[in-house]
Every structure is written in C-alpha cells, then in structure tokens.
Amino acid sequence: MARQLKTLGPNVLRCIALLFTLSLVNASEFDFTVEVAAGKFQCYFQNIENEKFKTLEIDYQVIDGGDLNVNFMLLFGGDILAQDKMKTDGSHRVEIKTLGDYQICFDNTFSYQTRKVVFFEIFLFDKDGNLDDLDVAKLANQDSTLNAQMEAFGVTIGEFHSTSNRIKGSLNKMEYYQALMRAWEARDRAIMSANLDRVTFWSFFNGAVLLGVGLVQVYMIRSLFEDKSKVGRMLRR
C-alpha cells in the first residue's frame, strides 16, 4: 500500500498542479484600481477569445476624488452596450455575442480640478452563469491516465474539479467582499478627509472674519472718542 501511494503521489500532485495552472491561465475574473486624471477620458480593454464565455459583467465604484462620481461606458466597436452618467457606482451585465476587444471607459472630462480613483471588477460567465475556468473534458482527453490515477483514490477528475470549483467559488466570494470592503473603506476615508479639509478651511475663514470684524469695531469705537479722527467725526454726525 505504501509503495502504491508512493507511485501515485507524484501523478496526483501533477494533476492538481495542472488543474490550478490552467485555472490561473484561463482566468475569468479580474479586478483593477485605476486613476482617471481631471479632464481625461480613459479606456481599458478586455479581450475575449474563448467561446465558452457568454456573459460579461462589470462592477465599478468611485472610491476617491471630488464628489465621487464619473461617467461610464462599455463599448464594443462603435456600439455602446452600457452607459452611466455622473454615478458613484454601477453594475452592468451584457451578453457576449461577438468575440473580440470590449472597451471599459471612464469619463472625467466634466471635472477640471479633481482626479477620480475607480475600482472595478470584470467577470466572465459561461452559458450556465458559472465562473468555470477549466474544460474538464478537454483535460481528460489530453491525458487519459489522469482519471484512472485519481480513481485509485476513489475520486474522478470530474469530482475533483467539482469540489475544487466549490472551494474556488467560496474563495472568490470572500475575495470579492474583501475587495468591496476595502473600496468602501477607501471611499469613507476619502469622504472623511474631504470633510476635514472643508471644516478646517471654513473654521479658519470664519475665525479670520470674526477677527477682522472685531478689529474694525475696536477702531470705530476708538474713533468716536478722538476729536481729530475723520471716521469719528463722520460717525458723530
């Protein structure tokens, strides 16, 4: 038994390594944080070459800059597939009818002074609505011995793939919510920083106004008791 485990161990490890390597190569979800400068219109491209992907979903959120709003467009060729104007966040899901380069554009041309920091995620779903990165049938055809080797341990490639997919799905959800929490935290921190700057500015401004009014009042009161003061003579009339 020990000899059999020693023989099959490297093959199982090779299978696991191959599955996870293919998962990394054929990724179907991406997340980015980008900065859109003031007065700029920036686009990013997502190339879709695999026919198994049937749906494209994009979630975005402005986490820093100005009033936390931006214009958004999803384009393919000359067609506008989705569009938002002056929004803080948004989510769009479109059907992939044609393979090629899809443009994800953020428009900050309406802002002349403040840049915008945008966090967005891209999801590619198959026809069943799953983020399935591996073609198990193709994998089994490429190496027919892997399935037999896995069955020696009471599990098939399909079962292993299903289990690993469930684990991967749970990890993806954890990663998504963690990224969302980080985006909310960054957004709240930006709002607090902007509020602090406003409060500090207006506090100094109001303090300067009060000081100026006080000095004017002192000067005018003193001028009332000075015979040679022109302001005092004007006030006494």
Image: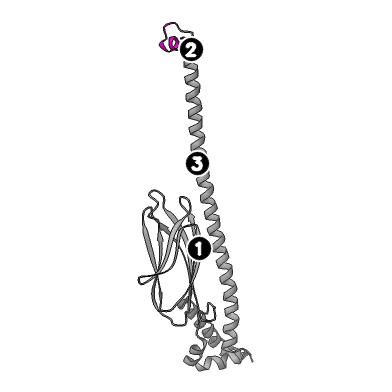
Q: Is residue 167 above or below residue 64?
A: below
Mark 2 Cα-neighbour bin, 10 Å: few <14, some 14–19, many ≥20: few
Mark 3 Cα-neighbour bin, 10 Å: few <14, some 14–19, many ≥20: few
User: Residue 222 bears which disc, if any?
Assistant: 2
The residue that disc 1 covers is 90
Which secondary structure lies at badge 2?
A: helix
Kind of residue indicated by mark 2? Arg
Q: Residue at x 54, y 59 (%)?
A: 182
Relative side of 143 to 44, left or right: right
Q: Residue furthest top?
A: 227
Q: Is residue 202 above or below residue 42?
A: above
Dot 1 or dot 2: first in sequence order is: 1
Q: Is residue 134 above or below residue 4?
A: above
The quadrant where residue 83 appears: bottom left
What is the CA distance from the residue labelled 3 to the residue labelled 1?
Answer: 28 Å
Percent across and percent down for residue 198 are: 50, 41
The residue that disc 3 covers is 198
Dot 3 or dot 1: first in sequence order is: 1
Check residue 236 for magenta coloring.
Answer: yes
Query: Which is nearer the eye, 47 or 12?
Result: 47
Query: Which is nearer the eye, 43 or 16?
Result: 43
* Magenta stretch in the rendered image: 227-237
Q: Residue at x 50, y 63 (%)?
A: 90
Check residue 123 for magenta coloring.
Answer: no
